[in-house]
Amino acid sequence: MENKQSSSPASFIGSTVIPGDVVLDLSSMANQTIKLGDGLREDRDAISAMKAGTLRCKKPNKYRIESCQKRYVPCAGDTVLGIVVDSKRDDFLIDIKGPALAFLPVLAFEGGTRRNIPKFEVGTLLYLRVVKAKFGMNPELSCTDAHGKAAEFGLLKDGYMFETSTGLSRKLLSSPTCPVLESLGKKLPFEIAVGLNGRVWVNAASPHTIIAAANAIMNSES
């Protein structure tokens, strides 16, 4: 059985692919910089699918396969919710629902120095950015954006964290704002942090609002 071949970069975008499908022909994209996300691998002059799902492209040329699954495969540039599981002299070990624990250098914070290393207890929830992610290696994380600023990253206090599929997480982060968040935002005042690793954190002034927001988001997947 022959794999499907792509005659142009747009051929499979928005379409369902399965493992082994050749979705991009690099020989026809010689002058373009291609970035690969979750579910894709490079094999000489071809990009192939490693899992079933829908091929997506984020401008200019970042490709990934979107699927509704619980398992998360780290990719550089992803924003994730991580849980501290241990601390070492030079880094914190973080659970991001990936195949292996990730590490967060103790200096990977805005203005981080040896004199102001943060202290996190086991179980602390953090909003993080994946800096490096390579097969067979522990992913590297940061509590800053690409410019070294804290931005929205860091400690998530109080609130409630729950898990979803990675597909729902991407929908919650999509633009324009997904319907469920747009509707909730008109009715309830709450904070939210969404990780591409299938974790969502919500916080509000009252427990009732937190529960209502969390339930609405979880039920939107069914």
Image: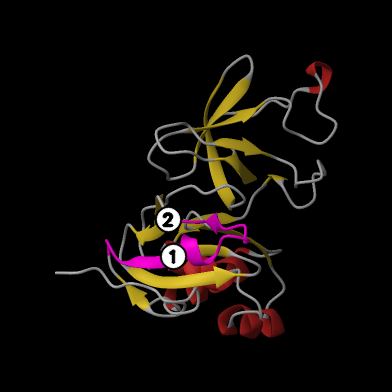
Residue type at mark 1: give it: Asp
Q: Residue at x 45, y 79 (%)?
A: 220
Q: Position of residue 219 (x, y in %)?
A: 43, 76
User: Residue 150: x and y, percent?
Assistant: 79, 44
In the image: residue 165, left or right of residue 106: left
Marks 1 and 2 in Cβ contact (< 8 Å) = yes
Residue placed most toward the observer, 125 or 71: 71
Q: Residue furthest left?
A: 1
Locate the C terminus and report the quarter of the image it occupies: bottom left
Provide the residue designation for mark 1: 25
As displayed, is residue 128 above or below residue 66? above
Q: Is residue 109 above or below residue 205?
A: above
Residue 69 in sight here = yes
Image position of 164 (left or right of 213): left
Decide: few, some or many residues near mark 1? Use Cα within 10 Å; few <14, some 14-19, many ≥20: some
Q: Position of residue 95 (x, y in %)?
A: 48, 38
Circle 2 residue: 45
Q: CA distance from mark 1 to mark 2?
A: 6 Å
Task: Specify the amino acid type for callout 2.
Answer: Asp
Q: Nearer the viewer, residue 149 or 218?
A: 149
User: In the image, what residue occupies the spot 64% across and 70% down?
Assistant: 59
Name which of mark 1 and mark 2 comes first in the sequence.
1
- The magenta stretch is 19-38
Classify mark 2: helix, strand or loop. Answer: loop
Residue 19, position as x, y percentages in the image: 27, 62
Residue at 66% x, 67% y is 60
